[in-house]
Amino acid sequence: MERIEVNLETSRKDSYEIFIGEDIMERVGLITKVKNHADRHVIITDSNVNPLYGEMVRRKLGETALPVDIIEIPAGESSKSLDTVLDVVKQLVGLKVSRKSLLIALGGGVVGDVTGFIASIYMRSIPYVQIPTTLLAQVDSSVGGKTGVDLPEGKNLLGTFYQPRAVYIELSFLKTLSDKDFATGLAEIIKYGIISDYDLFELLENESNGIKKRNSSLVKSLVGRSCKIKAGIVEMDEKELGLRRILNFGHTLGHALEAASGYGLSHGEAVSVGMVGAAKISHRLDYLDSGSCTRIVDLIKHYDLPTTIPAGLKTAQIMAFTATDKKAIAGRLHFVLVKKIGVPFVTAEIPSGIVEGTIEELQA
Ligand SMILES: NC(=O)c1ccc[n+]([C@@H]2O[C@H](COP(=O)([O-])OP(=O)(O)OC[C@H]3O[C@@H](n4cnc5c(N)ncnc54)[C@H](O)[C@@H]3O)[C@@H](O)[C@H]2O)c1
């Protein structure tokens, strides 16, 4: 079992551990009991994950002899909404969940973001832990404490920074993940390679066959490496005042595409196209050489992720959604670009027409 610490500067109380392995669920009850002293546990999960793992996790947590309830929400991005929050909160009240109770987010990024958000506002905040079940959630969304829901006007427009008490990454959960959702998680790992770790980028290029076949030691090393990168960045800039913004590589365009497609594009698919866009803008502005730009596009393609914008999405519509992006400051859009693979920077100095021109180039 690998253990990685997330040491946050603001308060020791907010620091926590990420546990990674193939036997984590065997110990989840014990670790949770020792660390949290909760009066009861409530698992929040979705309609796909519940039939697969809900009862098993309930049993493991039940070994602590504390009551364990399960609340199920419908699977999919449409559950990242205020309606879901209200519905779950009413059930928590019905279960007499108190500030001494512990919420358990069992699922992908949607369950994690919604549960974290509820935990941050229910009774002015109660503790929660993350048990991520998708690759995306294991390498990205479960770490760092960003929570939230979508609004019709845009992605993640309501949310909080609220750290979990612990993250339990059970790698065996990935066995039931669809190829599409596995690829979605790989998109975020590719992002870490591009913004932070050239060796990881090369590993993704050289070991693609084993990774696509989900070779367990390769997957374990990708998850551990990604969590270390994310934890390292979050430790330095928990509230995204500076450095953490590099994690948004591909997300400015990605979030706009996700919203403009009515969430028909998954987060990972939209971010993949967004990363291609950011690489092309970096090249258009003479920061990134054409060889590196091509390597980025080829790697994304190689993992069966999209590199073009689906037909039907208009440039003006996509641009309108970029305007509601949280990364816009004083009305100016901020982009994360790269000078070379592994060397990112954030800029608002993008000459007019470059973003629109790149969107048009990406239209299939
Ligand atoms: N908080 C953050 O820092 C952060 C970072 C990145 C992404 N996100 C958010 O994460 C969300 C996307 O997360 P996601 O890709 O995990 O999507 P998701 O939660 O919708 O999960 C994808 C699908 O996989 C199913 N699933 C989950 N685990 C499974 C398993 N083990 N076996 C079989 N099926 C399983 C789910 O039911 C769902 O249908 C987006 O809303 C995005 O905004 C948040």
Image: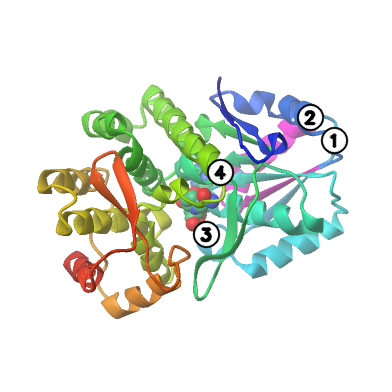
Task: Tell me if label 3 and label 1 are in contact, CB under 8 Å.
Answer: no
Three-letter residue code for mark 3 = Gly
Q: Assign the C terminus to one quadrant of the image.
A: bottom left
Three-letter residue code for mark 1 = Leu
Magenta-highlighted residues: 41-62
First of labels 4, 3 by sequence position: 3
Q: Position of residue 24 (x, y in %)?
A: 61, 26
Q: Position of residue 249 (x, y in %)?
A: 35, 52
Q: Which residue is mark 1?
A: 66
Q: Is residue 296 above or below residue 253?
A: above
**Label 1 crowd bin: few (<14), some (14–19), many (20+), radius 10 Å:** some
Q: For residue 170, which quarter of the picture? A: top right
Three-letter residue code for mark 2 = Lys
**Label 2 crowd bin: few (<14), some (14–19), many (20+), radius 10 Å:** some
First of labels 3, 2 by sequence position: 2
Q: Is mark 3 within 8 Å of ligand 1?
A: yes
